[in-house]
Image (cartoon, grey):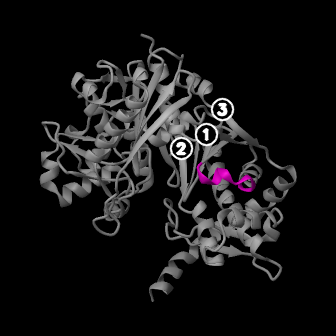
Amino acid sequence: MNQDYYLAIDIGTGSARAALVDRDGKIVQIASKEYEQKVPQYGWAEQAATDWWDGVCHSIRQLVLQHPDAAMRIAAICACGQMHGTVLLDAEGQLVNDNVMLWNDKRTTHHVIDFEQRFAPQTYLPHSGNPATPAWPGFKLQWLRDHQPDALARTAVVLMPKDYINFQLTGELAQDRTEASCSFMMDPQSGNWSSIMLERLAIPAAILPPIREASEILGVLQPGVAAQLGLRAGTPVLVGGGDYPMALLGSGVSRPGMGSDVTGTSCIITTIAPRPLLDAEISNVATCTGDWGPFVLLETGGDGMRWARRTLHENNLSYAEVNALATEAPPGSRGLFFLPYLTGERLGSHRNARAQYFGLAANHRLPELHRAIMEGVAFAAARHIAIMQAATGQKLERIVASSGGARSALWLKIKASIYGVPVSVPQEAECSVLGCAALAAAAVGHALSPQTAADRFVHYSEEVMPDPAWQEIYQQMQPIFNQLYFNSQALYDQLDALVVG
């Protein structure tokens, strides 16, 4: 029987999804099941790992019900998932805690502060590959050690969300390189667990599973599980990867010179590099294809537009109407700048940064206020792109834009003109699903590599070129934006004291 399909699994924060993808990279169908995120107290975020597995089983059975013939012709299964969720299993493979701390759980903030007070970035970046943030599993394990020592004592192995699903499918234990690279516990040079970081965090190495490449075959689908799901026993199951690096592959961002702009609530800018960029303002994720994805996250991306819609219009205008208003303003917003730090910064020495308009004059109207936000987000991103380009010596050649911000033609043109490169929009929005399919295709010999599979699967609906006239204006504005950014930092602590007082 021909093996003409790939089964992609995506463990999201809001739902578990399963997708059937054919050998041409066409998504035949996606099935999903939603689940809740639990907030036991302020700053905490948890989910039940059993909800993920129940969601996967439900979604796969829905696919099998709709496509019974295809279910027996699946060449391989590949899962991706939300990153950093810390699953604890005991020696019998049972969950130690029913609920799992998620990527957006902030209860580890004090552990991060304590670590940063004891260690300067230059002393740990070469061993961790990343600045310290509350998201990293290394700090989650510290919290468990200090607040739930009995749970950690019962722990035989620590997995990430998609690893837990893989364990249910195959009985095999592993963590992939993309997830491990963002754990704060992996040595970026060797790709192994870092003895130096584990010692500094006081985390036992014995509870960490082997690190394997996302593209490897982890094992095969167990007969009992196959019967439960209606699939073929013995179907190869890949190690898989985190949802974000998988989406990079599935959007065609898999080679140096390519970049990604994901603007939703926040704005994540990622480039592809042969090695991590060791900088206190830059995070690094290993890619599914052996490279690295240095990235920066602006906490305020599309959230800046949301703030303006709420504050200036009391939510009475739609986003389309706000976007239309912004198109009425000229490029450069008549010299009006917006620093997009409404909720501070994620990394760097001034996480208490504030947003501001600068240059406001009597001739500015609502269109300029809205366009300045779009331009401000792009200026902030471009500042980071310049840092990454300088560190790698690799010039950015193209940006692939996705998520909600990619639906604004104006914002795409602003970004292309500020970044100085073409901006492409994927035709298929389900980039993580295509990434899983590309990885699976290479693993079973249907493609020479994940990159060549992605080249065949990924198509773009549009390409937006920089506008030379806009570029000339923005090239004059970028240095002023950068100067505003640095000159404002001295005032943030004083502003905090003023607000507290």
| Residue nearest the viewer, comparing 141 with 189 | 141
Residue 430 screen position, x and y as percent: 54, 39
Corner quadrant of residue 58: top left
Residue 499 versus residue 127: which sits nearer the camera?
499
Find numbered disc 2 in the image and state the secondary structure of the residue it sits on.
strand
Callout in the foreground (3, 1):
3
Badge number at residue 294: 2
Q: Are marks 2 and 1 in contact (CB under 8 Å)?
A: yes
Circle 1 Cα neighbour tier, 10 Å, few/some/many (<14 / 14–19 / ≥20) = some
Residue occupying the point 29% across, 23% down: 221
Tag 3: amino acid: His
**Quarter of the C terminus within the rendering:** bottom left
Of residues 187 and 36, which is closer to you in this image?
A: 36
Q: Note whether residue 356 is visible.
A: yes
On residue 392, which mark appears? 1
Q: Position of residue 477 (x, y in %)?
A: 77, 62
* Mark 3 lies on residue: 459
Cα–Cα gap, marks 3 and 1: 27 Å
Residue 356, quarter of the rendered image: bottom right
Compared with 370, 362 (above or below) is: below
Question: Of the numbered discs in the image, which one, if any, rests on residue 343?
Answer: none
Contact? badges 3 and 2 (CB < 8 Å): no
Report the magenta residues as a range.
403-411
Which of marks 1 and 3 precedes in the sequence? 1
349 on left or right of 241: right
